Each structure stands twice: as structure tokens, then as C-alpha cells.
């Protein structure tokens, strides 16, 4: 999985529309192989990001879990520890 795409389900408070959009943007960048599309591909790129964000939001709204919600700060700290270990040496 792309390192910049983070799980968005089961957080308190829930993922924001901005977080969903950013995940969709990273996904489209990864799949298309383009960080910035050419002018000829911009409309298709933007449409894909919009549609993927829309579908992702529906998915998040419908997922059900019995696990307690995750704490954003705790999860961020775990990511920082993993990153330090990965780039330490």
C-alpha cells in the first residue's frame, strides 16, 4: 500500500472529507503514475479523485465494527515510531 494512504475507518472523530479527498488523490497519483497530470489529462484525473473520494466516503459510512474507535494521536505516534525505525539506518 502507498505509505501516504492511511486507514480512515474507526476513528473518533470520524475521517473528514479533506482526509478522504487526500487519500483519493494519493490513490489516483499512484495508479496513474503522475503526481501532476498533463493539461490533457487534468479533467480525467480530477474526475477520478472526486469519484474515488465519493465512493470512499460511502464505504466509511457503511462499515460496521465492534472495535473501540482509535485515537488519532496514538496512531500518529505509532507511525512516527515506525518511520524512525525505517529511516534510522
Image (cartoon, rainbow, N blue to C red):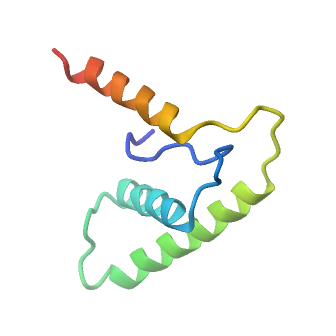
Identify the image quadrant of residue 79. top left
Q: Is residue 32 left or right of residue 60?
A: left
Count of numbered marks: 0
Residue found 48% across the figure and 70% down from its top = 49
Residue 54 position (above or below residue 32): below
Query: Residue shown at 70%/38% (left/top)?
Result: 69
Q: Residue at x 47, y 56 (%)?
A: 23
Quarter of the figure with the N terminus: top left
In the rendered image, the vertical position of residue 65 relative to residue 39, given as above or below: above
Q: Is residue 73 left or right of residue 29?
A: right
Q: Is residue 4 left or right of residue 49?
A: left
Residue at (42% x, 62% y) in the render: 28
Quarter of the image where one finds residue 46: bottom left
Where residue 81 sits in the image (x, y, percent)?
35, 23
Of all residues, the one furthest to the top in this rendering is 89
Q: Quadrant of the C terminus?
A: top left
Amino acid at each position: 500500500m502507498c505509505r501516504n494512504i492511511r486507514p480512515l475507518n474507526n476513528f473518533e472523530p470520524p475521517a473528514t472529507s479533506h482526509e478522504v479527498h487526500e487519500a483519493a488523490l494519493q490513490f489516483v497519483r499512484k495508479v496513474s503514475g503522475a503526481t501532476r497530470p498533463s493539461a490533457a489529462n487534468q479533467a480525467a484525473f480530477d474526475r477520478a479523485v472526486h469519484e474515488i473520494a465519493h465512493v470512499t466516503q460511502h464505504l466509511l459510512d457503511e462499515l460496521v465494527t465492534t472495535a473501540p474507535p482509535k485515537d488519532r494521536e496514538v496512531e500518529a505516534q505509532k507511525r512516527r515510531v515506525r518511520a524512525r525505525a525505517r529511516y534510522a539506518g
